[in-house]
Image (cartoon, grey):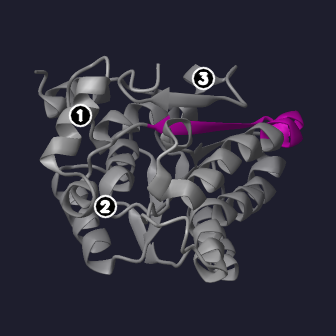
Amino acid sequence: MIDPSEASRAAWTARYPDLAEKTVFISGGATGIGASLVGAFAKQGARVAFVDLNVEAGEALVERLAAEGARAPWFRTCDVTDTSALRAVIDSAQALEGRLDVLVNNAGNDQRHNPETVDEAFWEWCVSINLRHQYFAAQQAFSWMKPQGGGAIINFASVAPRLGIPELSVYNAMKSGVVGMTRSLSKAFAAHGVRVNAITPGAILTPKQLEKWITPEDEARLTGEQHLHRRLVGDDIAPTALFLASAASNAITSQAITVDAGLTA
């Protein structure tokens, strides 16, 4: 079996010179996929601003990346479901260098739930953490990208809707919505040089997933169903985000790119 860390490190060797000195805003960047995204952009020389509610993990990530010689990211605490706070922190990130080049809407929560007992409060929470904040973050980022004449917005969807996982019925509705939102915003923003794409991760086995949801038996089943029979980790997603943010993908917009080792193929 391929060592996922070795495979991911090889992918990270790709360099995108145009990302150096770009200002990149990432939501939910302290742990899991988000931490991989922050690290990948920082090691490209980008000015990374990220937010999370996990202060301890966010501060530790900044210290670790600085110790590794990467450009130290800018970290702030923010609840992305608070739209006013989210708009304000995006504006603060833009003010770091006087521009905002890349938005990565990574924050989300795949809390399992029983569709027979879902209530309106849970539904509204799921909307706010998995869909609504992506829309308003994109709106705010575009307000800065429009006068610049360009930028890249990367939303996060999921393969879960294609799998029809019963315990993720509300989450699946939101992540399906991300794909539709991506396609509409890509058309709305295209005249101003702003590209909008989505990444659709597969079964990314972050520490949180392994702790809360995925048993060893689940992992064996998932990796067995994938064409590539290995564990997928956050570092497997970061290279796709780098590509979509860079000029190397300057003719790509309105796409939802799946990274799932063939799970849904």
Amino acid type, label 1: Arg
Q: Position of residue 37 (x, y in %)?
A: 39, 47
Name the residue carrying label 2. Answer: 31
Magenta-drawn segment = 186-201
Q: Nearer the viewer, residue 262 or 57?
A: 262
Name the residue carrying label 1. Answer: 221
Q: Work out whether 123 lies above or below 151.
A: below
Disc 3: CA contacts within 10 A as few (<14), some (14-19) or many (>=20): few
Q: Tell me the SS state at disc 2.
A: loop
Q: Residue at x 59, y 60 (%)?
A: 170
Name the residue carrying label 3. Answer: 249
Q: Position of residue 199 (x, y in %)?
A: 53, 37
Task: Evaluate whether residue 189 shows in this view.
Answer: yes
Which mark, by number, is residue 235? none
Q: Nearer the viewer, residue 28 or 166?
A: 166
Viewer-side label of 1, 3 = 1
Amino acid type, label 3: Ser
Residue 191 highlighted magenta (yes or no):
yes
Give the CA distance from mark 2 to mark 1.
25 Å
Q: Residue at x 65, y 65 (%)?
A: 133
Disc 1: CA contacts within 10 A as few (<14), some (14-19) or many (>=20): few
Give the CA distance from mark 2 to mark 3.
26 Å
Q: Residue at x 45, y 57 (%)?
A: 167
User: From the viewer's perspective, is 125 left or right of 59?
Assistant: right
Q: Nearer the viewer, residue 43 or 226?
A: 226
Q: Tell me the SS state at disc 3.
A: helix
Question: Which residue appears farthest toward the front when viewing the image?
Answer: 116
Amino acid type, label 2: Thr
